[in-house]
Image (spheres, grey):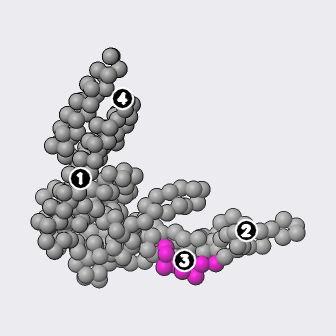
Amino acid sequence: MPTTNLQLWESVQKTDPAYTKKYTGAGGFTGTSINPTYLHRKATEQFGPVGTGWGYTVLEERFDEGAPLNLGVEGQPLVMSKIHTIKLAVWYEVDGKRGEVVHYGHTPYVFRTRHGIQTDPEAPKKSLTDALSKALSVLGFGADIHMGLYDDFNYVEQVAQEVEIETAVNQVEAKERQKAKAQAWLDENIRLMNESVNLNMLAGVFKSALRKLEAKRDTAGIKRLTLAKDRKKAELEEQEAA
């Protein structure tokens, strides 16, 4: 039995950046998508094999008609756009108790592109994947993406580092490699601050590096960076006053 209501959510919310990609949707909307097979594997890790520990049932499937794609000589629609819609129930078991989430998936079936009117024979499969991913997201799978955390590059980098350690054959060596890399990065930023020729340049380097250290909760790094900034700031202020 979960010790807290968020135990399942917190165990599946982190997404490996290696299984994501950026996309641009209609109207220029941009976002991050998750590889659906990766989500299926995470569900299997959490609940057990599909069909025994978790699975899904199609409750409804239909083609919805949308706006006309072209008109005849008398203004009558000749071809209508169509959307494939599926209603899916995803079930799972936790500690012998069965749960269920219901969600929808949608995919354009008949639509217009710059090449003309197209039909997508893969629409039902895509709608199934869409509904399944949405249902799993309600349970917390990929929550960091849906909560907008992937908009922060520092967060994505931190997750990539955590995954590298978790999956490394030798975790001690992986941690040491990351520690050395982080140290070299901090040294470089301190060097850039020391070479700043004015207070604006100093503040820019400091703020950028500070955001990354705060995302990692690196208190030692923050302290070292701040001390270096304060020393250089005092030096520049003294030069300006002279």
Q: Position of residue 44 (x, y in %)?
A: 26, 76
Looking at the image, which is closer to me, 241 or 80? Answer: 241
Q: Is residue 110 left or right of residue 43?
A: right
The quadrant where residue 107 appears: bottom right
Query: Which kind of residue does numbered mark 4 sit on?
Result: Leu
Q: Earlier in the sequence, mark 3 or mark 4?
A: 3
Residue hosting label 1:
184
Where does residue 169 sit, x and y in percent of width and height?
16, 74
Q: Badge 2 is on which residue?
A: 69
Q: Which mark is residue 123?
A: 3
In the rendered structure, find residue 28 and report the number of the disc placed on it: none
Mark 3 in CB contact with mark 2 (< 8 angstroms): no
Mark 2 crowdedness (10 Å alpha carbons): few <14, some 14-19, many ≥20: some
Q: In the image, which residues are magenta?
A: 119-127
Residue depth check, mark 3 versus mark 1: number of the one nearer the observer: 1
Q: Residue 200 at x, y = what percent? A: 39, 31
Q: Secondary structure at mark 4?
A: helix
Viewer-nearest of discs 4 and 2 = 4
**Gap between marks 4 and 1, in whole Å?**
24 Å
Q: Report which residue position mark 4 lands on.
A: 199
Residue at 18 percent of width and 39 percent of height: 224
The amino acid sitting under disc 2 is Leu
- Could you classify mark 1 by the number of other residues whose Cα lies within 10 Å: few (under 14), some (14-19), or many (20 or more)? few
Question: Which mark is first along the chain, 1 or 4?
Answer: 1
User: Do the numbered discs 1 and 2 sit on residues whose CB atoms are within 8 Å?
Assistant: no
Q: What amino acid type should be assigned to the residue bearing mark 3?
A: Ala
| Disc 3 versus disc 4: nearer the observer | 4
The residues bearing labels 1 and 2 have C-alpha atoms spaced at a distance of 57 Å
Q: Secondary structure at mark 1?
A: helix
Whole-percent x and y of residue 108? 58, 71
